[in-house]
Amino acid sequence: MSRMQGGAVVVLGMLALVSVASEAQAGEVVYQFRTEEDPASPPDLAVCAAAPFAVNVRLGGSVYVPLHSIRDGQVVFEGRKRVGSATACVRLTDFTFPPGQQVPFYARFNLPDGSFTASGTCTLVSNNVPEAGLVLAGCALKLVDVPRGFVGGTVSSTSVFNPFQLPGYATGSYYTLYAFRDDRRRDAREEREEWDEREAAERTAAAEQ
């Protein structure tokens, strides 16, 4: 996927992850982030083992925060600072990737606020735009496991799958994760401790490989 670059534009402020608390609904939280397949973030096999279907494709990736123009919402910088990791588990039965096919999808997103696990389907949109072999899809997922302090929500994506490794494209997605907190909000110390524990576990697992 070609890199999108912005000029001198005003962009939305960025913390560790884009997080918007809605004024209309207390406890409503929205995260917007990008994933990209990354050899440095291999898929977590334990995640795919828990999928509610037989998995035959496993993808591991890193999570990044894109920046947008406040004028029109266009992404002006894809973000290159890694803020988390993701594992995607898929069952493919037709490797011609026919448009309209629905594919079972199970994923875990390890974000600064914790690990969110989602299950649902991705619908294949096309297999020849902008060239033959590149697959575009849209996913609609339900959160089935959430960090302490959350009660559930949804995840949706616009995704690119490059199964034939065409030059100039990367397998990855732009996600919107929409979640609700319960009445008890974790304090910053608790969130930081959980994030540090996950980072230490990832480093240990990588060193053991």
Image (tube, rainbow, N blue to C red):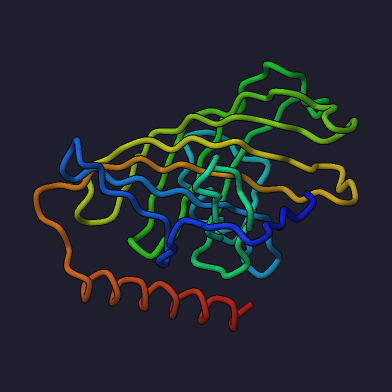
**Which residue is drawn at the image coordinates 44% and 80% (left, top)?**
200
From the viewer's side, name the closer residue of 71 and 102: 71
From the viewer's side, name the closer residue of 161 and 94: 161
Assign the C terminus to one quadrant of the image.
bottom right
Q: Position of residue 150 (x, y in %)?
A: 23, 49
Corner quadrant of residue 154: top left
Q: Position of residue 48 (x, y in %)?
A: 53, 48
Is 7 left, or right, of 200 in this rendering?
right
Is 4 left, or right, of 52 in this rendering?
right
Q: Position of residue 184 (x, y in %)?
A: 10, 55
Which residue occupies the extreme left position in the image?
183
Corner quadrant of residue 102: top right
**Which residue is drawn at the image coordinates 85% and 27% (left, top)?**
128
Count of residue discs = 0
**Which residue is drawn at the image coordinates 60% and 62% (left, top)?**
79
- In the rendered image, the vertical position of residue 120 relative to residue 115, given as above or below: above
- In the rendered image, the vertical position of residue 166 relative to residue 120, given as above or below: below
Corner quadrant of residue 97: top right
- In the rendered image, the vertical position of residue 80 relative to residue 74, given as above or below: below
- In the rendered image, the vertical position of residue 10 relative to residue 122, given as above or below: below
**Which residue is drawn at the image coordinates 61% and 48% (left, top)?**
75
